[in-house]
């Protein structure tokens, strides 16, 4: 194994497994989302089910690369692995990665089969996952064989959602997931560097190129810009007009603006006061919308998130219950 790769042995492996991760091959991992657990018990579902028609109980949360170039202050994920701006080592076979991910995901759900609070029908449906959210930890888009994995998932009739930090614009040019998310964490270079703490010295320039790549990607797949709102000191709820300019540059189909939640590793860097209320998120979203024409079309107060679109007619793209065909 390349000594620069995320090591799946020793302290890191034990740390991740204690947190509920299951490691796949040399660089991938899976973990059951808490919304999947809630859904199996007939409780609250992920906002993506409300917005996009994604069945929470049939969704798999995974990654194809454990590490990221950023140390974002608001990130809840484990950051004990060394940062990487590029993929290290030899990439695993994409079919193996996806098949093993499903196998491990089903093992993680096995306890729900005998759970009196869980729906037997939903558990049986969960044995055949239909949605893959590549957003668990690290920067999954760095995986060199990502398009092969997406094609394999599509051949099975599954949808794929990729979330990227905007530090690998060249990789964004080469993938066709069902939905491509770009995280927009700040409205200016100075604030981005303070919040994302990237190992890339040109993180702002990479983000700008990623916005351009997202605009071009809209010809191939659904596109989203996501802003995670952090309130107060060390926050990013400022300069809505500058956010609007960046959003116009990326021209996403959807705009998601959601509130930061103090969980996971973010507890070591931020405080309770950094969490905005849903009404704070809505008000900030409306301010951004005034400058770029996006309007709120849905919301989920439980997750402190609003969904915005520029053209009401584009609601025809909602929901996405199956993989969209894409051009090569």
Image (cartoon, rainbow, N blue to C red):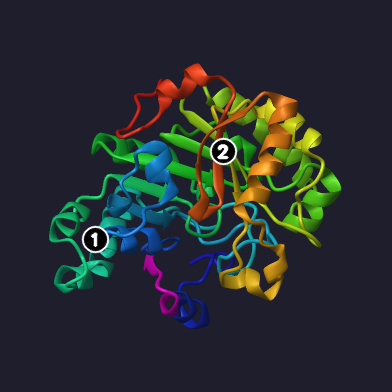
Residue 316: x, y in percent? 41, 21
Residue at the spot x=40%, y=29% of the render?
Answer: 318
Report whether 197 appears left or right of 297: right
In the image, 290 versus 292, the foreground residue is 290
Residue at the spot x=36%, y=57% of the render?
Answer: 44
Q: Is residue 301 magenta?
A: no
Residue at the spot x=45%, y=75% of the render?
Answer: 19
Q: Is residue 24 magenta?
A: yes
Nearer the observer: mark 1 or 2; the answer is 1
Q: Which residue is mark 1?
A: 103
Q: Is residue 320 above or below residue 63?
A: above
Q: Is residue 247 above or below residue 272?
A: above
- Residue 215 numbered tag: none
- Residue 171 numbered tag: 2
* Distance Cα–Cα, label 1 vs label 2: 27 Å
Quadrant containing the C terminus is top left
Residue 54: x, y in percent? 34, 42
Q: Residue furthest top?
A: 313
The kind of secondary structure element at disc 1 is: helix
Q: Is residue 96 above or below residue 18?
A: above
Report whether 240 appears left or right of 105: right
The kind of secondary structure element at disc 2 is: helix
In the image, 183 versus 315, the foreground residue is 315
Q: Judge the density around disc 1: few (<14), some (14-19), many (≥20) Cα neighbours within 10 Å.
A: few
Q: Is residue 83 visible?
A: yes
The part of the chain drawn in magenta is: 17-25
Q: Earlier in the sequence, mark 1 or mark 2?
A: 1
Report whether 284 appears left or right of 130: right
Q: Judge the density around disc 2: few (<14), some (14-19), many (≥20) Cα neighbours within 10 Å.
A: some
Q: Is residue 228 visible?
A: no
Q: Residue furthest front?
A: 279
């Amino acid at each position: 194994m390349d000594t620069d790769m995320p090591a799946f042995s020793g302290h890191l492996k034990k740390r991740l497994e204690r947190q509920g991760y299951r490691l796949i091959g040399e660089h991938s991992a899976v973990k059951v989302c808490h919304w999947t657990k809630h859904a199996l018990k007939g409780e609250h579902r992920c906002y993506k089910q409300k917005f996009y028609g994604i069945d929470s109980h049939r969704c798999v949360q995974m990654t194809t690369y454990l590490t990221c170039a950023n140390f974002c202050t608001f990130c809840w994920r484990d950051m004990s692995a060394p940062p990487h701006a590029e993929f290290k080592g030899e990439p695993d076979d994409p079919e193996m990665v996806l098949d093993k991910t499903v196998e491990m995901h089903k093992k993680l759900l096995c306890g729900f089969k005998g759970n009196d609070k869980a729906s037997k029908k939903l558990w049986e449906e969960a044995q055949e996952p239909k949605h893959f959210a590549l957003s668990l930890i690290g920067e999954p888009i760095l995986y060199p064989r990502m398009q092969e994995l997406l094609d394999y998932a599509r051949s099975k009739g599954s949808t794929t959602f990729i979330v990227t930090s905007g530090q690998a614009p060249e990789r964004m040019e080469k993938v066709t997931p069902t939905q491509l998310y770009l995280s927009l964490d700040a409205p200016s270079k100075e604030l981005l560097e303070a919040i994302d703490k990237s190992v890339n010295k040109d993180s702002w320039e990479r983000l700008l190129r990623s916005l351009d790549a997202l605009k071009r990607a809209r010809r191939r797949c659904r596109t989203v810009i996501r802003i995670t709102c952090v309130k107060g000191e060390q926050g990013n709820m400022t300069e809505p007009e500058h956010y609007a300019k960046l959003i116009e540059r990326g021209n996403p189909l959807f705009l998601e603006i959601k509130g930061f939640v103090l969980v996971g590793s973010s507890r070591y860097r931020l405080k309770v006061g950094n969490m905005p209320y849903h009404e704070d998120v809505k008000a900030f979203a409306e301010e951004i919308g005034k400058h770029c024409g996006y309007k709120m079309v849905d919301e989920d107060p439980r997750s402190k998130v609003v969904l915005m679109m520029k053209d009401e007619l584009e609601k025809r793209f909602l929901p996405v219950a199956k993989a969209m065909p894409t051009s090569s």
